[in-house]
Amino acid sequence: MTRSLKSPLLAASIIAIGGTAMASTDLREEAKEIFSPVPSTVPAVKDNPITPEKVDLGKALFFDPRMSASGVFSCNSCHNLATGGDDNMPTSIGHGWQKGPRNSPTVLNSVFNDAQFWDGRAADLAEQAKGPVQAGVEMANTPDNVLATLNSMPQYVEWFRESFPEEEDPVTFDNFAKAIEAYEATLITPAPFDAWLNGDDAALSDQEKRGLELFVDAGCASCHGGVNLGGEGYYPFGLVERPGADVLPEGDKGRFVVTETADDEYVFRAAPLRNIALTAPYFHSGAVWDLRTAVAIMAESQLGAELSESEIDDITAFLGSLTGEMPEVIYPVLPAETAATPQPTGEVVQ
């Protein structure tokens, strides 16, 4: 889509809310056709009933570095709940201090994504949880080693039995992943934008409302809609104009690695935008640290639009309204080791 935001028609449409611009109620009705507020309860997860016991187990596993081969890295290492659900680094540091190939996505609200990872190779959070554990540049472990570690600690064995009471031998790699999925499903962050969608006019400032109107009118919402304002579809990075190699590395062809289809070269899942103000640097390359710059790059590369400074300010202000309230996170007390933790053996998946 190529569109200029300099037209007199659009300029007239973005003057102060309450003047000749779209009334707040009309803007809300249009927005509700595109976006959905974060639900007030933990969302259900397919084939994985969420129970308090399972959530507590998943929380312990999420924070436990002993799930890695080195005993150094946990899920929270790359998806730090204190820094927006990611690690605020261009690419994450993993096993042997190696650097990963892509920027770490936020775990916050990730339950609302249609698929996980930048290329969508994991269908859900349970499948995603298995990936980093086995990746040679991340936690560099194996399923067998993880299960040996868990079985060496009676407290973990008891927690698995409480979480999966219908199973004779509940300590499995599948259940390890399901427990982490259950915990991650609780990491949702209602934001001022949700309050506004639900009818609170005062939840957004006039500038944030102008930014929302621009976001919708310019076409940003065509990729960044739904509950998570993204995470639901796959699009070429550079639909109109491909960014330079400093932003879009030539060696990373995105979803093509998953599908091996030529049309999927440089195609990525639309990034979810909730808490985007907290999760710099941006894009799968982690190459851009400033949110205003990221907004301008997306407008040019995806929409063929050159935004004015004030338009960039307004859209950036709207994106700030997506910063939500974090659920209370109390660091778990992890099970004590009653026997020597098994040393990693076997082949590590690279």
Image (cartoon, rainbow, N blue to C red):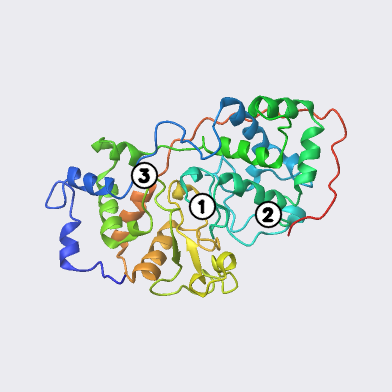
* Closer-to-camera residue (323/27): 27
> In the image, which disc is placed on residue 93?
2
Determine if residue 71 is in view.
no
List x then y, in percent, for residue 322.
Answer: 39, 45
Q: Secondary structure at mark 3?
A: loop
**Mark 1 residue type:** Ala
Please tell me which residue is depicted at 46% across the width and 72% down the height of the picture.
243
Is 8 above or below relative to 327? Answer: below
Please tell me which residue is depicted at 15% across the width and 52% down the height of the picture.
21
Quadrant location of the C terminus in the rendered image: bottom right
Q: Are marks 2 and 1 in contact (CB under 8 Å)?
A: no
The image quadrant that residue 341 belongs to is: top right
> Is residue 178 toward the left or the right of residue 136 in the image?
left
Q: Secondary structure at mark 1?
A: loop
Q: CA distance from mark 3 to mark 1?
A: 24 Å
> In the image, which disc is placed on residue 321?
3
Residue ranking furthest to the left = 20
Is 329 above or below relative to 297? Answer: above
- In the picture of the structure, the residue carrying the numbered disc 1 is 115
**Mark 2 residue type:** Ile
List x then y, in percent, for residue 252.
Answer: 58, 69
> Is residue 245 toward the left or the right of residue 65 in the image?
left
**Mark 3 residue type:** Ser
Q: Secondary structure at mark 2?
A: loop
- Specify which label sits upstream in the sequence, 3 or 1: 1
Q: CA distance from mark 2 to mark 1?
A: 23 Å
